Every structure is written in structure tokens, then in C-alpha cells.
Amino acid sequence: MISSAEETAIELSTILQHKGILSDNLDPKHRFFTTGSVLSFEHIAERWLGYHISVECVDLPVKNARICN
């Protein structure tokens, strides 16, 4: 069985390394964004990830895209 997630990560790593933009930072910074409900996103993501996150609401350049609450 092939893991599409693993294969995608390998391919992305290869591309980033080839372009010279692969980070060697062992302490990554994660930022989370949503156009929807910040509270819903936080709740689901925290259950899935197992730790507290901060989520920012963003407005995409699409008519009526922002529905944050």
C-alpha cells in the first residue's frame, strides 16, 4: 500500500531541496488560518493534533468568502 501523504512529503522535500529553500530548522513554527469559524477549526484541530493552537481568520479575495465568527 502506498501512503499518498508520505509520497507527497517526499516529493515536496525533494522539490524544496532542489530549489535551495528546504529549511533545516528543527523547531518549526506553525500558523493556522481559516475563512470559516475560528472556534470550530480550533476545536477540531486541537483534538486531532493533541495540543492547543491559535487560529487566524483570513479574508480571501472572493466575494463573500469571509464567514469567521
Image (cartoon, rainbow, N blue to C red):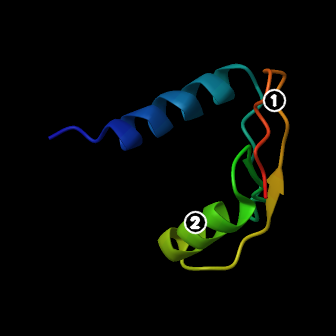
- Marks 2 and 1, Cα distance to the nearest angstrom? 21 Å
Establish if 32 lies above or below 52: above
Establish if 21 lies above or below 5: above
* Numbered disc 2: secondary structure: helix
Q: Is 29 left, or right, of 1 in this rendering?
A: right
> Which residue in the protein does label 1 denote?
60
Q: Quadrant of residue 43?
A: bottom right
Name which residue lies at 60% across and 23% down: 15
Q: Amino acid at mark 2?
A: Ala
> Which residue in the protein does label 2 denote?
45
Q: Measured from the top left, where is residue 28 in percent x and y?
A: 75, 59
Name which residue lies at 84% across and 22% down: 61
Report the front residue among 55 and 69: 69
Image quarter in which the N terminus is found: top left
Dot 2 and dot 1 residues touching (CB under 8 Å): no
Q: Amino acid at mark 1?
A: Leu
Name which residue lies at 72% across and 20% down: 19
Res 5 label: none
Name which residue lies at 54% across and 79% down: 50
Q: Measured from the top left, where is residue 11 in percent x and y?
A: 48, 28
Residue at the left extreme, as displayed? 1
Q: Is 11 left, or right, of 21 in this rendering?
A: left
